[in-house]
Amino acid sequence: MTSIRRWLLGWLIFGLAATSLIAAYGIFHTARREASELFDYELRTVALSLPGNIAAADAADRASHDFNGIADDRIAIDIWDKQGKLVYHSLKEPALPRVAEGFRSIKRDDYSWRVFGLQQPDRYIQVAQPFSVREDLALRLAWRTLWPLALVVPVTIALVLFVVARGLAPIGGLSRALSRRSLDSLEPLQVGTRVPVEIRPLVDALNDLLRRLSDASQAQRIFVADAAHELRTPLTALKLQLQAARRDGTLQGDGQTLERLEGRLNRIIHLAHQLLAMAREDANRAASTTLMSLRRLAERSVSDLSLLAEAKGIDLGLEERGRDTSDNYVVLGDEHALGILLNNLIDNAIRHTPEGGKVDVILARDAQGVGVEVIDTGTGIAPDELNRVFDRFYRGAGAQGSGSGLGLAIASSIAGRHGATLEVRNRDGGGGLIVKVGGLAAGVVTG
Amino acid sequence: MRLLLVEDDEMIAETVLDSMRRLGYAIDWAADGRAADLSLANGVYDLVLLDLGLPKRDGIQVLNTYRKAGGAASVIILTARDAVDDRVRGLDAGADDYLMKPFDLDELAARVRAALRRRTGQKQPVYTHGELALDPASHEASKAGVPLPLVPREFALLQVLIEEPTRVFRRAELEEKLYGWGEEVGSNTIEVHVHSLRRKIGAEQILTVRGVGYRLKGLE
């Protein structure tokens, strides 16, 4: 993942460090050259200004001469007479070999020396100095220039960190505003009034997109709701007519045909009902949640559907995983929506379970929160179709019942809105389906 | 008993009018909101079946006007809207009951009967459910015409169940209904009563809804 912040900080700090190093090297180099010129001049001056009588003095007597000032600079002076005999040597160390006239750099015993040779009428003077003296001075000079720089670097880095953080703050704010939003919210972004001009077009474009999306989804919701609503009136008329006609015998036809006719009609009614529920669920993104008992809700759903279960000869019951029968499984949720979810799951289970089967609604509580499972003894779902069950209008390949194909899609939408999981899997060993709603936020009743 | 049906869909109206007349009610029909206002202002009705989505005037408005003018008939709302808000709005406006489209003719007839019963103060009708019959006034119960020898608690239990035959009663609810405040109720008292009642009226008559409670068996 690329990060503007890391990129900026990396290049700014690396660049600063690199330029500082180059500058330091440059300064040291210049200082050394200057020191070198200075010392060359000194060597030359020393050679030229050596008094003549020094040649006459005994080499052993040299200690009496006060060359201390010069000796501090570790200058070695060697003087040879016309016969090539070493007549004076200033340092205790053995004399350097005689080299040619002028400036030379020589190496002896790991030490580099700068040597100046001068031929005078009666003697040959050679003045030498180790390079290390110059290096020391160059370092001292360079350090004097560089130490303020060494102080400035950390301050600059701190400044860079601060400026980058401040500069990127609006982007961070925008990201946070985006991540705080609920997944399905189409509200315009609120990022405050002080949005920099560079980000303003981005925010405007996003808000424009959100607005158009919101309009489109609003239009779709209204259309679906209207359509479902408009469907209901003629369906009611049809159903009433059919019932009345069957009752008073004005409708001719064998009983089986009429029954199938009514079955089909009920299926269309169910579909219209589910469509409306779906449209309402889509529109209800921001519905308020309250503390409610999942046990009461499950009792109601099981009660409501017990007639349907009885008609199909299915044993429908409410169970619980926990041992505490006084546990009401209080959750924070939208009671109406969760009721629809549970009804859909139980209704589905009853539809897909053959006569004489069993449907269990099981309340459970685990680390993820409160959950409810609906387990049936139906045929289950082919494994390769399991991932399609939440698709709208998806009905299993072998679906016999009169489902609309919307039940699980609605359930999934409601579960998603509650931050809960909805999981569908076949029972181990086949022969049934487990639909599990998990991770409902457990509520705490106070007082 | 005079009824008014306010419904804009002709086909629905026709069927409802027909079946209500068959049941012996006198019933008029208003096809839109304004016609409904007129009928309600001039006629004396015991019960109004009111559709909400009406042309010209919304059903809620019709109901508001009617209640403000002092209209006292029972009102059952028939609507294709099922949003919770609409239901609350309808009941707030003074409706007595609420029936969602599409509904069954039987259910409509039952609601009409119940509303009229509440209205005429006939609190204790003879309840019937399949072969079972229970008369609270004379404290008699019978199955297929044969009197049932029920002790008071069994009778009370059957009455609770037969008053709302499609409702599942939780054990705690039954305890509340059968025993007064402060009365000591054993943990399996209700099971004992259900068991003894089942022996007298037939075990299949009372259905156990696992984990929830009891209700009378369904009729279909």
Image (cartoon, grey):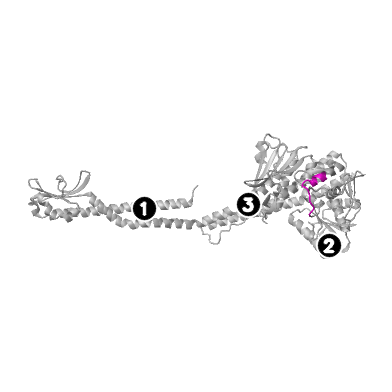
Judged by depth in the image, the label closer to the viewer, 1 or 2, is 1
Around disc 3, counting alpha carbons within 10 Å, would you say few (fewer than 14), some (14 to 19), or many (20 or more)?
A: few
Question: Which residue does the numbered mark 3 point to in the structure image?
Answer: A184
Q: Quadrant of residue B117?
A: bottom right
Q: Residue furthest bottom?
A: B69
Q: Is residue A302 above or below residue B120?
A: above
Please state the chain letter of the residue tagged with numbered disc 1 in the rendered image. A
Which one is nearer the viewer's eye here, A300 or A212? Answer: A300
Question: Label 2 belongs to which residue?
Answer: B37
Q: Which mark is residue A19?
A: 1
Amino acid marked by disc 2: Asp
| Residue in the foreground of this view, choosing between A89 and A227 | A89
* Disc 3 element: loop
Tags 1 and 2 touching, CB below 8 Å: no
Sequence order check, earlier mark of 1 and 3: 1
Horizontal side of B86 relative to B131 (left or right) equals: left
Amino acid identity at mark 1: Thr
Q: Residue at x 14, y 53 (%)?
A: A47
Q: Quadrant of the C terminus of chain A?
A: bottom right
Q: Are marks 1 and 3 on the same chain?
A: yes
| CA separation in Å, label 3 and label 2 | 44 Å
Left/right of residue B125 with respect to residue B55 in the rendered view: right
